[in-house]
Amino acid sequence: MTEAGKLYIRGLNKKFNVDAKEISVLEAINLTVERGEFVSIIGTSGCGKTTLLKLIVGLGGSYEGDIILNGKRVDGPGLDRGIVFQDHRLLPWLTVSENIGFGLDAKIKKAERQEIIRKHIQLIGLRGFEKAYPYQLSGGMAQRAAIARSLVNRPAILMLDEPLGALDALTRMYMQRELEKIWKEERIAMIMVTHDVEEAIYLADKVVVMSSRPGKINKVIPIPLARPRDRDSYEFIRIKDEILKEFHLEAEKYFSYSI
């Protein structure tokens, strides 16, 4: 299990101590993400999707089992992994260029640094906004800048925690196409948490459906559709119905436990 860029998760368990009680959040998670693969994860609220992303990026603390990237066990943060949250989290006192370059290694020479930033601004389509501040950007533009900031160190894998969830419907569809374009150009693995089933199918090579309390993988559904994808095609709708069936069955169990 040493292939470059490949992620293996084996027997992953995660527990939290809440009010002196041990709560199981993730249980027996087994998942392989191929190099350059796009994976979407869906599931009811509280099923551990964000916890899983944080563990992969190295921000989730200790865990049982193995998370292996590039042949090494993940035991903390590293430049080989990046993450983008629903809130863009750009630093308001820095410009777009400064935000994108913020995480670059200080040892990188100025000329190389500027070239890296320039290429990523071009990649995300923000030429002309290099000196703009976050408050001067639309929601979609800010998220593109956040994605670029996570890509400048050339990570092997990028985690996306509902990155388009706060956008309006039209902007969200536009950003889905933009995200797909960035993924195609960068050719790195991406794992995205989303509650939008159409979004999951439109972007992913496979969709992971998670159960709740504790979070487990119910089903992994491959998406063998040509790109760009037609949301109105028979196969797209068929896969959507299959995922919704899994998702709704799990949601019914979740809410019956909650009442």
Image: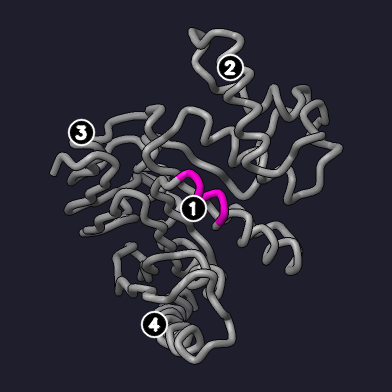
The tally of labels here is 4
Q: Amino acid at mark 2?
A: Arg
Q: Which residue matches tag 4?
A: 246
Dot 1 surroundings within 10 Å: few (below 14), some, or many (20 or more)?
A: few
Between discs 1 and 3, the one toward the N terminus: 3
How far from the left and from the top, in percent, is residue 177?
A: 62, 61
Q: Which residue matches tag 3?
A: 72
Between discs 2 and 3, the one toward the N terminus: 3
The residue depicted at 81 percent of the width and 47 percent of the height is 138
- Give the secondary structure at mark 4: helix
Q: Is residue 71 shown in magenta? A: no
User: Seen from this angle, which residue lies furthest right?
Assistant: 136
Most common secondary structure along the magenta stretch: helix
Q: Which residue matches tag 1?
A: 184
Q: CA distance from mark 4 to mark 2?
A: 46 Å
Q: Amino acid at mark 4?
A: Glu
What is the span of residues highlighted in magenta in the rendered image?
181-186
Q: CA distance from mark 2 to mark 3?
A: 28 Å
